[in-house]
Image (spheres, helix red, strand yellow):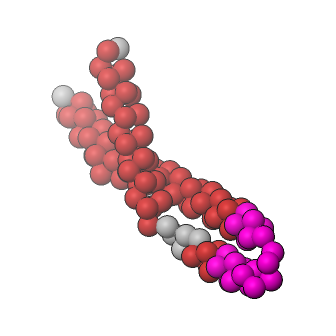
């Protein structure tokens, strides 16, 4: 009983570590290009308001909204990549380690 609990906890820790590592790595890559285009639009808006005397608050709030949307989408992409990495890890572990081990155990049991 204790051995199964340790294996389960180890599996959970490994899964969380893989998910977190891959998600953070992908998030740092800014897969959607960050908000460079939004920044350029914000700068153009500020430049356009420079001589008109209008407030730049609208430019900054539009930039903040667009940046938040891009960041949320990047988090979704990073989370999906993390889930895919954990799934791939367990799939490879099953095919390369668990199944052959089970077959060897069955073959040894049949031979005995």
Residue 102: tell me if it is visible.
yes
Left or right: residue 63 versus residue 106 is: right
Q: Is residue 21 left or right of residue 77?
A: left
Q: Position of residue 103 (x, y in %)?
A: 29, 42
Looking at the rendering, in which quadrant would you find the C terminus? top left
The dominant secondary structure in magenta is: helix
Image position of 54 with respect to 8: above or below: below
Q: From this viewpoint, is residue 99 visible? A: no
Q: Nearer the viewer, residue 71 or 6?
A: 71
Q: Quadrant of the N terminus?
A: top left
Q: Which residues are magenta?
A: 41-61
Q: Nearer the viewer, residue 33 or 99?
A: 33
- Above or below residue 50? Residue 2 is above
Q: Residue at x 56, y 56 (%)?
A: 75
- State the residue at coordinates (33%, 47%): 93
Q: Which quadrant of the structure image shows residue 58? A: bottom right
- Asked whether, in this view, residue 42 is left or right of residue 22, the answer is right
Q: Is residue 104 magenta?
A: no
Task: Please tell me in which quadrant of the rendered image residue 16 appears.
Answer: top left
The residue lying at 44 percent from left, 67 percent from top is 29
Residue 70 screen position, x and y as percent: 63, 65
On the rendered structure, is 8 left or right of 50?
Answer: left
The percent position of residue 65, horizontal first and vertical second, equals 71, 62
Query: Residue 18 versus residue 41: which sits nearer the camera?
Result: 41
Seen in the picture, residue 5 relative to 101 is either above or below; the reply is: above
């Amino acid at each position: 009983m204790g051995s199964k609990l340790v294996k389960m906890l180890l599996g959970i820790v490994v899964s969380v570590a893989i998910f977190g590592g891959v998600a953070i790595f992908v998030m740092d890559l800014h897969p959607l290009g960050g908000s460079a285009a939004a920044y350029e639009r914000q700068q153009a808006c500020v430049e356009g308001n420079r001589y008109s005397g209008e407030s730049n608050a609208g430019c900054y709030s539009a930039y903040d909204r667009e940046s938040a949307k891009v960041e949320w989408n990047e988090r979704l992409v990073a989370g999906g990549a993390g889930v895919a990495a954990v799934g791939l890890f367990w799939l490879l572990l099953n095919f390369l380690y668990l199944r052959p081990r089970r077959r060897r155990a069955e073959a040894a049991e049949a031979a005995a």
